[in-house]
Image: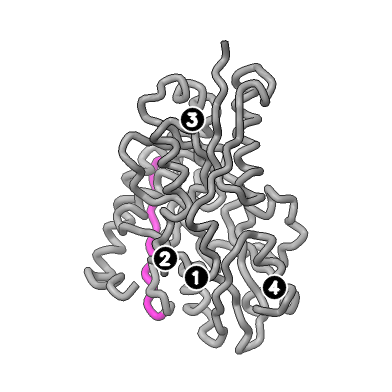
Amino acid sequence: MQRRYRIGTRGSKLALIQANEVARRIALASHAPVEDVTEIVVISTAGDRVQDRALSEIGGKGLFTQEIEEQLADARIDVAVHSMKDMPTVLPEGLVIDCFLERADPRDAFISLRSGSLAALPAGSRIGTSSLRRAAQVKAKRPDLEVVPFRGNVDTRLRKLEEGIADATFLAVAGLTRMGLLERVTAPIQPEEMLPAVAQGAIGVERREADDEAAHLLEKLNHTETSLRVAAERAFLAVLDGSCRTPIAALAEIAGERMRLRTMILTPDGAEVHETEREGLATDAVTLGIDAGEELKGRAGPHFFDEV
């Protein structure tokens, strides 16, 4: 009898799209109908329930994962599907993520009903975002703009924009693509203008480390290039002990056997910015990430993140 995998996920529209894509791929790998081998289990997280404050004020990235990982550890679900940009750098003991779907476009999208680009926004315009990374990069490039808090799922943030709460906002191109909302993008933002979040656009599947059967199945779903890119970026993040409380950005790209890793850390006000790059073999992804992290940590000094 084939195993039926209980797939844990958040309940947002985007999270369910991603979980159902994992379910579809598990079914293909199992050569069985999706309803026979998978079950979607929606789990409410603190990050979804608390919408009136910035994540940095209430605990950071773990707010989107704790309840899901508790159910995974207790075997109430078999695997969990995550947007990797939401994942803390350290996983709970006994859990592992070694399966990644092919990464979508990692760029941020500029969305506005009033301007064609970030550069074209008039002075004094309001940018809606609750991302410290996005806010810090905006403040570094456009200190004449006002950043206002902007939380909620994709639909909520688009509605807030239409209501005039802000003149522009940012969303991940990957999420909008998966939701069929690419037409809402005013302009994608090139990494040279705004470096993305660590692992933005990547979907990871978490399992119990001791679950060999799940490991064997998920190995068939794993996209090797994405796993290397995510490994480099998360290794960089880990050196800096990064979370939603710290403005950190990174992007690893692979051409042939070579990897290029671009990284950045900022103060929340955008006044101080440190950047570096690494190039090397893609198979040395973790080493490249650690090395970049150590350089920026040394350049910034021990008190760089004290006020965050």
Q: Earlier in the sequence, mark 3 or mark 1?
A: 1
User: What range is drawn magenta here?
Assistant: 271-281
**Circle 4 sits on which residue?**
161
Q: Where's the N terminus, which quadrant?
A: top right
Give the residue type that dot 1 points to.
Arg
In the depicted structure, whether residue 20 falls above or below residue 142:
above
In the depicted structure, whether residue 294 falls above or below residue 187:
above
**Circle 2 sits on which residue?**
58
Give how far apart the Cα atoms at labels 2 and 3 are. Answer: 28 Å
Q: Earlier in the sequence, mark 2 or mark 1?
A: 1
Nearer the observer, disc 4 or disc 1? Answer: 1
Q: Is residue 192 visible?
A: no
Give how far apart the Cα atoms at labels 4 and 1 are. Answer: 18 Å
Residue 217 locus on image (x, y percent): 51, 22
Q: Residue furthest top?
A: 1
Contact check, label 2 and label 1, Cβ < 8 Å: yes
Give the residue type that dot 2 points to.
Ile
The numbered disc on residue 78 is: 3
Q: Earlier in the sequence, mark 3 or mark 4?
A: 3
Disc 1, SS: loop
Contact check, label 4 and label 1, Cβ < 8 Å: no
